[in-house]
Amino acid sequence: MVKAGLLSKFARAYLGWSLLFAILATVEASRDAVIFPGMAPTILRDGEVRAVLLSEHPILLSVYFVVCVPFVWRTVRSPILRWAFCVVLVSGILSTGSRGALVLVAVLAAVNLVSHLRRARQGARMTNVLVLGLSIGVALGIVTLVAGVEPFEGASITSSDPTVASVQYRGVLYAEVAQSLKQMPFGWGVGGLPEGQIIVSSPFGPKDLALTVDSEIVLLAFDFGAAGVAAYLATMLWLVLGRGFRSPVSGAAIVAMSAGLYVAIHAWTGLPTLALFLVGATASAPTVTADRSLASGALSR
């Protein structure tokens, strides 16, 4: 697709389908009933239906929507359409009930603001500070991991509120990464963490961490050990520091991979395919070429 110059067509198609499904997700959540009964699981939060449509899970559907945001900002020339499309996508994300996707949208908004300031020759220093901060954060994470320090030491599930318990559960997951790497530095294998190996108590009953891993980093640590974690961090560093958001494809790739902080990407079917495609397209084309290719097919009406 890169060699044939078809990235602009891909961006148009992805944007069109995302807008359509974001509208359908909003309708599904507002009517409090699934549009495609029997095609996907019905998932509730506080008694209300979370939009899922034809995807595997509401969280995955929200990732598909937020991945589209870099395409909107880089390919839609009309400011009115750009904001309208973003509103539709955010509405779809809200319908899925995903907090992680909303955080990614906020980060994208901040990055876009910094980008505008930099083009105005006011934000170069701010951009450098953000990049430096990210690099230091990743470096500290690697050092603490190697040193065996547990940054989430003492993490546990104590709240009976599902929303709070979900956040605490992810803290427990990350707390177990260092211990897992100590015990199995090369991972447990492609079969993953064996059931019954790590049991965590909670107000909802005992939780087996092998059954639900809501983090790509944790899942890579369980499956492939330190090599898996290093591969993920190396990919993120290459995307953020090397390609950044200058190209809509690399921006979308960064978003898809960043979702791995709260989604186990390779545990699903559609999401890893999309993430690998975006990373591959980013690696296959120079940033300038990708920018020109998409700019030439930008949506202006």
Image (tube, rainbow, N blue to C red):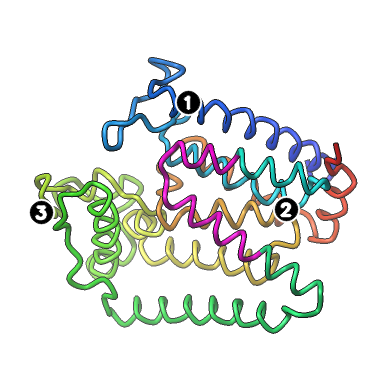
Pick the quarter of the image with the N terminus: top right
Mark 3 and mark 2: Cα distance apart in space: 43 Å
Give how far across and how far down residue 162 sits, in percent.
23, 46
Q: Residue furthest top?
A: 37
**Over which residues does the magenta segment extend?**
89-111
- Magenta: main secondary structure equals helix
* 57 left or right of 159 in image: right
Compare residues 271 and 111 and report the one nearer the observer. 111
Residue 136 horizontal/vertical position (percent) = 50, 82
Q: Taking 232 as reference, is 143 above or below it?
A: below
Q: Residues within 10 Å of mark 1 (few under 14, many from 20)?
A: many
Q: Amino acid at mark 2?
A: Pro
Identify the element where label 2 is drawn: helix
Q: Quadrant of the C terminus?
A: top right
Characterize the local packing of mark 3: few (<14), some (14-19) or many (20 or more) Cα atoms within 10 angstroms.
few
Q: Residue 201: which numbered mark, if any?
A: 3
